[in-house]
Image (spheres, rainbow, N blue to C red):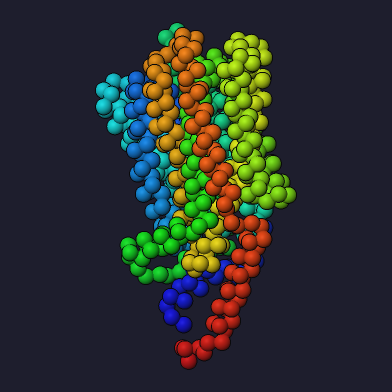
């Protein structure tokens, strides 16, 4: 048998000893690591533009451009992390060495992001922001990509994968929203010098310290909690080849049709979500006129949505399948998100200051985000199912590469979201250092009429791509059967070969 075949069989052969079941405790510990990504994501999406624009004085367009430049670098960094992780050989497996290494640097650099030097010039501050964004996201990717890839390695079951990713998504939303809630209720409080709590620079500094420590701890807990699974995870084969071979492997994996469909869908939905989240603080503070306490109440609605979404997704996966469920959920989420704005612009919604405004908006946000959380879980689980389809055509396991692309799509939330949000704020002439209640109604109307159609169009594009996804439950189970048959045939061929040592 030639070296190529030897590599392919070694690369694909599973561990033959009986794998212990994926217990609820293991699922919880696995998912807990996403607290770090959720905290980072919500910090970038909810607070970063507000902090560097309204507090530190950089223009919204410049902040958005910096985030976009950093995103372009991520397009190169993330696949490299995924590829190296797929090919890494160690006694701790392919994924865990990277997870452990990322913990402390990720937390430390996130702390620095929210402690920007106040006496620097705007050009110096812009460079500081660019460097810290790149470093923070690179270290988070060093954890997130290998950790995400574990979902496809821990189980091949169609529904258990959805359950695993439900825990990941729940903790990402729970961690991010909880930290944002703490930021508004504890750190971003008004004082004598800062009557608007969201504009208090000291609050951001304290937030950065606490968030950085929690991120580091979450990564370490998740890595340690899944370490006992290492003996049952695949090891890569010994494959010779340099840069050219690596690039050929990447191209082969990334050319998978099902993967490209999900990548396009993920980028579109991530861009829409990025705009939505980046502008949420602007809408909540200026359009709806909420104070810090009311913003904290809205955060509670998001927490409820993260729980409901994680519970609903596995059930819909079992009853309707992943693709059909995801399409229906995305469509409904658009309706519930846009409805309050459409009703307000039509003078059919409670006015600012009305006691009905907060509870009505809270219900709409909770429903919309529940639908978004569930659909995000289902699309991530669909990506895990691409691993076996790709393995059949390439002979390689490429979970790290696939989830590096998913991580990049998630970064589009903050990168493209901040960039487009900054452009929108500039386009509608939103004032810097704006005081709530003093922004003109025309500017606020233009903000809604510009942002909402862009978001809705991107979500609809994402739905169109998901509709073309080819892997159903039956197709996935057929892929597993073909792989099992291939491995059995390879093992039988080996057993018939003469012992060359004799």
Residue 493 image point, x, y percent: 56, 83
Residue at x 56% of width, y 62% of height:
388
Image quarter of residue 84: bottom left
Above/below status of 20 relative to 318: below
Above/below status of 82 relative to 345: below
Above/below status of 232 relative to 223: below
Residue 442 image point, x, y percent: 47, 14
State left or right for residue 420 relative to residue 156.
left
Give whichever of 81, 380 is nearer the camera: 380
Residue at the limit of the structure toward the front, as seen here = 346
Residue at x 54% of width, y 33% of height:
456
Residue 475 image point, x, y percent: 63, 61
Residue at x 42% of width, y 78% of height:
3
Can residue 7 be seen at all in this image of the molecule? yes
Image quarter of residue 106: top left
Residue at the limit of the structure toward the bottom, as seen here = 502
State left or right for residue 409 relative to residue 305.
left
Residue 391 image point, x, y percent: 52, 65
Can residue 195 be seen at all in this image of the molecule? no
């Amino acid at each position: 048998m030639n070296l190529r075949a030897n590599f392919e069989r070694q690369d694909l052969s599973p561990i033959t000893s009986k794998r212990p079941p994926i217990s609820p405790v293991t699922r919880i510990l696995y998912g807990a690591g996403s607290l770090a990504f959720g905290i980072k994501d919500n910090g970038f999406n909810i607070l970063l533009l507000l902090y560097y624009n309204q507090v530190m004085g950089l223009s919204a367009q410049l902040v958005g451009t910096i985030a976009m430049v950093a995103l372009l670098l991520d397009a190169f960094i993330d696949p490299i992390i995924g590829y190296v992780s797929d090919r890494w050989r160690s006694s701790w497996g392919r994924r865990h060495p990277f997870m452990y290494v990322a913990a402390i640097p990720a937390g430390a650099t996130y702390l620095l992001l929210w402690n920007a030097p106040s006496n620097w010039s705007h050009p110096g501050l812009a460079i500081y922001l660019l460097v810290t964004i790149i470093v923070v996201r690179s270290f988070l990717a060093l954890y997130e990509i290998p950790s995400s890839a574990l979902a496809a390695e821990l189980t091949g079951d169609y529904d258990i994968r959805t359950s695993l990713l439900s825990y990941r998504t729940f903790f990402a939303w729970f961690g991010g929203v909880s930290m944002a809630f703490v930021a508004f209720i504890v750190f971003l409080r008004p004082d004598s010098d800062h009557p608007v709590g969201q504009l208090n620079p000291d609050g951001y500094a304290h937030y950065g310290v606490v968030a950085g420590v929690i991120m580091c701890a979450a990564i370490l807990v998740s890595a340690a909690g899944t370490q006992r699974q290492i003996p049952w995870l695949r090891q890569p084969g010994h494959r010779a080849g340099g840069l050219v071979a690596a690039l050929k492997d990447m191209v082969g994996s990334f050319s998978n049709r099902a993967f490209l469909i999900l990548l396009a869908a993920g980028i579109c939905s991530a861009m829409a979500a990025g705009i939505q989240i980046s502008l949420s603080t602007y809408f909540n503070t200026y359009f709806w006129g909420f104070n810090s306490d009311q913003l904290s109440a809205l955060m509670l609605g998001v927490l409820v949505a993260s729980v409901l979404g994680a519970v609903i997704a596995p059930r819909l996966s079992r009853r309707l399948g992943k693709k059909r469920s995801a399409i229906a959920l995305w469509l409904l989420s658009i309706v519930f998100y846009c409805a309050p704005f459409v009703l307000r612009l039509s003078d059919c919604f409670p006015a600012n200051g009305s006691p009905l405004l907060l509870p009505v908006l809270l219900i709409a946000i909770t429903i919309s985000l529940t639908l978004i959380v569930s659909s995000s879980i289902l699309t991530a689980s669909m990506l895990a199912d691409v691993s076996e389809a790709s393995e059949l055509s390439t002979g390689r396991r490429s979970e790290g590469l696939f989830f590096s692309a998913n991580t990049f799509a998630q970064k589009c939330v903050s990168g493209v979201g901040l960039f487009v949000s900054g452009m929108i704020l500039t386009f509608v002439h939103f004032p810097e250092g704006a005081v709530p209640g003093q922004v003109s109604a025309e500017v606020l109307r233009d903000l809604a009429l510009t942002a909402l159609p862009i978001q809705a169009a991107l979500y609809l594009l994402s739905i169109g791509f998901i509709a073309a996804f080819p892997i159903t439950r039956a197709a996935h189970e057929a892929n597993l059967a073909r792989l099992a048959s291939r491995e059995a045939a390879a093992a039988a061929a080996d057993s018939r070969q003469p012992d060359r040592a004799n």
